[in-house]
Image (tube, rainbow, N blue to C red):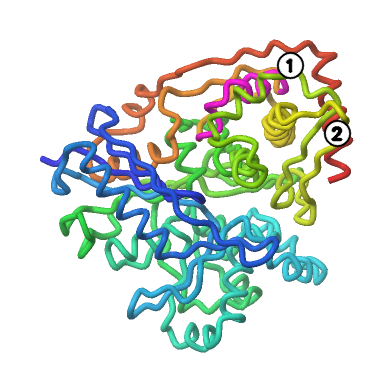
Amino acid sequence: MASHVLAIDQGTTGTTVLILDRRLALRAKVNQEFRQIFPRPGWVEHDLEDIWGSTVSAVQRALREAGLRGNELAAIGITNQRETTALWERRSGRPLHHAIVWQDRRTTDACAALKAAGHEPAVREKTGLVLDPYFSATKLAWLLDNVRGARARADAGDLAFGTVDSFLVWRLTGAHVTDTSNASRTLLMDLRTRRWDRELLDLFGVPPSVLPEIHESSEVYGTTRGVKGLPDGIPVAGIAGDQQAALFGQACFQPGEAKCTYGTGAFLLQNVGPEPVHSSRGLLATVAWTIGGETTYALEGSSFVAGAAVQWLRDGLKIIKTASEVDALAREVKSTGELVFVPALAGLGAPHWRPEARGLVRGIDRGTTAAHLARATLEGVAYLIFDLAEAMRAEAGKPFPVFRVDGGACQSDLLMQFQADLLDVAVERPRMIETTALGAAFLAGLATGVWKDREELRRAFKVQKRFEPKMKPVEREQHLAKWRRAVQAA
């Protein structure tokens, strides 16, 4: 009997594939980067063929690394960068245009016009989201209105829309589906009914003919067919947006439990149980997952930039050669002094929601060095997460018992210690930080009987390192005062 689960974690800068066995032993982990496309300032795109190519390559390499044949896989799970918007031809599967990435800000004016017309309260009540170019609906409307012939072809039923999960499932199985967690990020699904909403479709000018079917997060959507390097017939059995998948992978199955993922962006989610919680502090209500007919909701705050700030140091300023060098460089100085960096490189998300904001370095003097900037970059990420956590703690009315973290940037001990100091809460980093892919594997394995239940998965959670807060209250307040002055100027 096949007993391994393959997880595809399709992220913003690359695709990671994990293979786990039934005992949760990691048999393979492969990452395949792909190019980023920046047609204009504030615009970010991906070539869907690059995404597919990176996925196929990573799957083949992972199978080789694990020493497995494809028929030894019991299931495939998918987790994905959310909100990124794809449009392709139903007949050929050919992308109609580059995907518009979640970071893209080209529809800022369209969102502002909808706000000015008074639509945001109704949209927020139905979707739990705000009118921001971050989400999928205005990106899809832009594609339909700006790609020649797209709207007419969509109306005729020739085109298919999806977030990246939908595109991958289409390529793997031929099914046009999504799950509730991804659908809840489009501005087109009613949170409570978990169905596409006709009033929202009319508001954004989206024809129903382009939409995928909404399914649960753990079920068989179809089986592989015609995929290079994989046999036909492997069930694709789990889907969740990357942050919801990380919440599941951190075993945050009970209301109140929370995690923060430090990836390209940073995302804080708290399990709030079977009813959505609407925030008055700029946080988002979202679906966490739907399993066995029961939906779990989450409260979410997001920072558009986390690991991307370190990538900027590497690729833009070229002061480090690899992202892993940032800690060593930052440790060359004990303090940033008056230097503070607001990493609003793609606007500010919750709780600020200022898409027009831009990155700001404040407090430069003659003694400022690359080491100061590296340390300020890491601290800037931690400050943004502190703002999210404070808003969430106020919304929930109680502190976090512990702060669970994952994602590539959480490997920075300096960043994690500073985060613990700002929050005045212990930070726990798990043994396996790829909890996004782990969550996708869990969902697929539960659907196909590889694992019995969530309690079996909870027992598998292991902490690799715990960071205890060390900063004195007076010093903490000095840091936060410096941050608040800078973020107001961004």
Residue at image location 31% in from the left, 33% down from the top: 453
Residue 27 image point, x, y percent: 25, 32
Closer to the chain start, of discs 2 and 1, is 1
- Return the mark for residue 415: none
Quarter occupied by residue 307 = top right
The residue lying toward the viewer, choosing from 65 and 141, is 65
Q: Is residue 415 magenta?
A: yes
Q: Amino acid at mark 1?
A: Lys
Q: Amino acid at mark 2?
A: Ile
- Return the mark for residue 334: 1
Q: Residue furthest left?
A: 1
- The N terminus sits in image quarter: top left
Residue at image location 59% in from the left, 15% down from the top: 467
Determine the secondary structure under disc 2.
loop
Q: Which residues are magenta?
A: 408-422
Residue 370 image point, x, y percent: 72, 31
> Alpha carbon of mark 2 to alpha carbon of mark 1: how far?
16 Å
Residue 199 image point, x, y percent: 62, 73
Residue of label 2: 364
